[in-house]
Amino acid sequence: MKVVMRSVVGSLSFLSLFVFSAKAQTLQGPNVNPSNLAVLIEWEKFTGRKADIIGDNFSAHTWDVLRDATSFRQEGTLGAVAEQLRRWQSAFDEDGVLHFGEGDKPYLGRPKGRLFDYELELAIPMFPNYLTDESGNEVEASQVPDRWQMGRVDNRHHSEAKRAFRALAAALVHSGMTRARIRLAWEFTGDWFPWTIDPQAGSTRGTAEQFKECWKFIYLTMEEVNPHFEWVWCATVGFDHFDPELAFPHYPGEEFFDRGDNTDKLLVDYISVDVYDADGECYFRDEYSEKEESRLRPGYWNTRDQEREAAFQHFRAKVFEGKGNLAQEGESKTYGLRYFKTLADKHKLPLAVSEWGPWANYVPKTGANAPVFLRSAAFGGDDNPEFIDGLFKWNQENEVAYSVLFEFYNGGEGDTVDHTLLPGYWNSSRENRPRVSLYPSGSSFSQITDQIHPRAAKAYLRNLNEK
């Protein structure tokens, strides 16, 4: 098995990784969440190059959705995961016909590569969205405390969970994703998924130890089916409430013990983070941030070059170079990129950025004369080329393995968060997107209505072409 082999050759492979890492470029590509492969095609049209890596996020309403993943080759109604896998297949077939989630509209296009030409990173849930409680009622998984014991044979969720993850592993193999990178329980440091960790007692959220036990169970279950997956431990930068390293999974046991460095086997191949240009929304707000928010909120702050550059330097010190410091006052209270780079180096693992992108929080136009206006928090976000330039530079300086642009727009009623760079809005909610510019009428960018982040997109292309 792969895990045994790693114990024997781990030191050599890690040494080789670091000898050659200086020559390797950061892999680039888009996230096609949720399996809208048109994003991949439009990304390749926009950039003029084949993507190196593609990301996708899987979600499951119940255990059955994961268990039925192997039905992706069947006709008729499928569960969400099986439907996603079927879309993956159609994206790379001879016709290149894709189908969107809204009305199943056909889209004609062809990726530049075949499936095996791309690295794949797949975000996999630790729990489905809903589980049965002790009374047999279907409730949100976050309200079911005993889910954290699913790795135990005597736990009532154990059998279903084991069948579900074995089936998922088999479906990924049958889909041609044998060597996919599994981003299990992504963004566990946030507070929006049922695998959220809370160090405080008395919560249905899990502890760091419970998280590691569930990771171990899923890892071993899926590795029994396919030992060639790679595993991505993914935190989110911001929303800090505990030291993420407490949830870093090892496997204590004789067969996994690495006698090369006298440590337990790591059940991780990559340490990764999700990071967005969202100062004030996601990251620790100090007195300076609050003052700048009050001063800059009335205008479109990043049309002013000097203020934009100064804001990014503050953002960089906090979010890019944040080392993490919850216990006492320090240079940063955010577990930033620097913290995770240090953690990756400590474990001799590569660092990756699994999601990143702009952050435009705005209220869409709802009436004939109603304005579209930004709801920026503090400063940062919106059409900010400094953030794009900064992350490319940081990735290069710190030998980041890959960086996946989260090309996504969550349309709908009320506030909208927009992470997109591509023109034309190639996402599942593109039909509902307001066709207006968010720039003031006097700006040279005010006439651009098919792209909300034109300057950030220009910076993205420039950085790609410099590689």
Image (cartoon, helix red, strand yellow):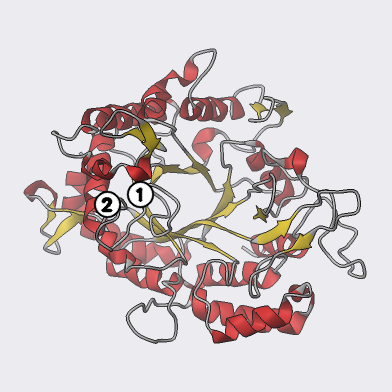
For the point 49% across and 75% down, which residue is it? 284
Q: Does residue 63 lie above or below 293 as drawn? A: above
What residue type is disc 2 on?
Phe
In the image, 134 versus 358, the foreground residue is 134
Residue position marked by numbered label 1 in the rendering: 195
Left or right, 294 with reference to 182:
right
SS label for mark 2: helix
Identified at 64% across, 61% down, the residue is: 359
Percent x, y of residue 384: 70, 69
Q: Is residue 217 above or below residue 339?
A: above
**Mark number, residue 211:** 2
Report the quarter where the N terminus lies. Answer: top left
Q: How many marks?
A: 2
Question: The disc labelled 1 sits on which kind of residue?
Answer: Trp
Q: Earlier in the sequence, mark 1 or mark 2?
A: 1
Q: Position of residue 406 (x, y in %)?
A: 58, 52
